[in-house]
Image (tube, grey):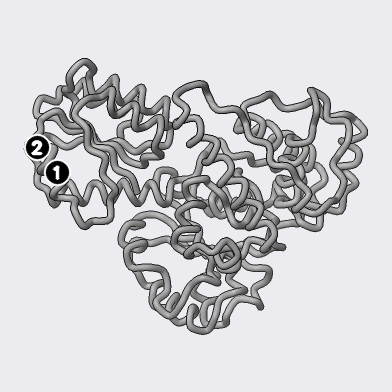
Amino acid sequence: MHLLLVEDKDSFRRLLVQALEGSGWEILAVAHPQEALAILEATPCEIMVTDLRLPAMSGLELLKRAKRLRPDLRVLLMSAFGEPGDIVEAMAFGADDFLPKPFDLDLFQATLERLQALTEAPSPDPREPWVALSPGMRALDRALGSLAESEAPTLFIGERGSGRTRTARRLHTLRHPKAPFLPVDAASLGSDGPKGQQLAMLKGGTIHLQNLDGLSPEGTLGLLRALGTEGIHWSGSASSLEAIPAPLRPKLGALVLALPPLRERREDVLPLFRAVLEQSARRMGHAPPVIDLCVERELLTRPWPGNLAELIWLAERCLAQCPGALLSKLPTAQGLGEELMELAWPEPGPLEAMLAKIQEQAEARLIRRAIKSHSGNLTETALALRVTHRLLSQRLREHRISLEDGASGTP
């Protein structure tokens, strides 16, 4: 994980770098804010630590410009002369925390660990598409509202791709809007259960166990031990209650919500398709096409065996193949291997920065395609891509790719 340190005092900058040696951070330490901005244009940094008083540009101005370059950047401010007004303004522009100098190095490291937890398991985006016009989804929406005051573990039952993790995120947002949320593929758990570091960093947040029907006996034992961890909220998803290992049902199934498949929520199909189309178009850097009436009729009569995952995949494929401002025909059902990979042009700038942006887009597309071809199974996807489980999980977080949504980059 990349940490950008901006401090113009050489001795203090070296002290902070030395304090973090061996802690797993990839540290980029600079003295000038312009150097920091150049790094942010070329490198996907997750956390920035900066002084408020810097040469040629204030820490506040650096914060504002850094957030424009990297909206998801977590920022820790530090200063020996921090005025309350400056701190309030910094928080308004997206700073996550403030440390007055001099500060204890243990406190510095603990603060960075908290920001790392928020980076690795961000709180859900409240703007994520949520459509509840059909009777089944209206009932589900009312149930989520009623359960918002409860802290009980919740199970989400439904077909693969029906939006189980999406619904779990929504309930988490209602319960703990600013706390981290981490989906974990249950099939990847071994006898140790979730990693101790994950549990330590997620205090106050939620771990959502995806695909509990794929949990091994060893994973069940490890998970039973982890469920007693204080300060962690739990939820899970599976195709049915019977598919969940029996010892886990009473511990995770205090509350059970059933999700309707997409074929039973026809009123939601067109609004969902438009929302995904618009979000995907924004991500690709162009306006979404207008949907022709014949396409609308075809969408409404489609059987949707893949549920939401199929809808999202279809919307992205339409964008890649739509030649103009009107979507007049849906793509035919061809194999994934026949798809073309279309990437948005990066913003003009240094060649290295533009290439880095294109590589980032391409990596996300390749990972979504691999997840789709392995039905959202993280372990099988990692084996197919010949990467470690940990590295693939990190890339999923960086690109905000959900296993539940299959090939989608939409949360």
**Please, is residue 401 above or below residue 43 in the view?**
below
- Where is the C terminus found, in terms of image quarters? top right
**Please, is residue 195 above or below residue 322 in the view?**
below
Q: Position of residue 402 (x, y in %)?
A: 57, 52
Amino acid type, mark 2 = Phe
Q: Dot 1 surroundings within 10 Å: few (below 14), some, or many (20 or more)? A: some
Q: Dot 2 surroundings within 10 Å: few (below 14), some, or many (20 or more)? A: few
Q: In the current view of this chain or complex, which residue is farthest to the front?
A: 351
Q: Position of residue 250 (x, y in %)?
A: 52, 76
Amino acid type, mark 1 = Leu
Q: In the current view of this chain or complex, which residue is farthest to the top?
A: 56
State whether residue 255 appears in this view: no
Residue bearing the label numbered 2: 12
Q: Residue at x 10, y 33 (%)?
A: 10
Left or right of 332 on screen, residue 188: left
Q: Looking at the rendering, which quadrant does residue 296 occupy?
A: top right
Q: Residue at x 33, y 26 (%)?
A: 37
State whether residue 76 appears in this view: yes
Residue 298 is labelled as: none
Q: Looking at the rendering, which quadrant does residue 306 occupy?
A: bottom right
Residue 16 is labelled as: 1
Q: Residue at x 68, y 71 (%)?
A: 240
| Label 1 secondary element | helix
Q: Position of residue 141 (x, y in %)?
A: 64, 47
**Please, is residue 306 above or below residue 294 in the view?**
below
| Label 2 secondary element | helix
- Residue contact at pointers 2 and 1, CB within 8 angstroms: yes
Left or right of 290 on screen, residue 369: left
Q: Which of 263/174 is in front?
A: 263
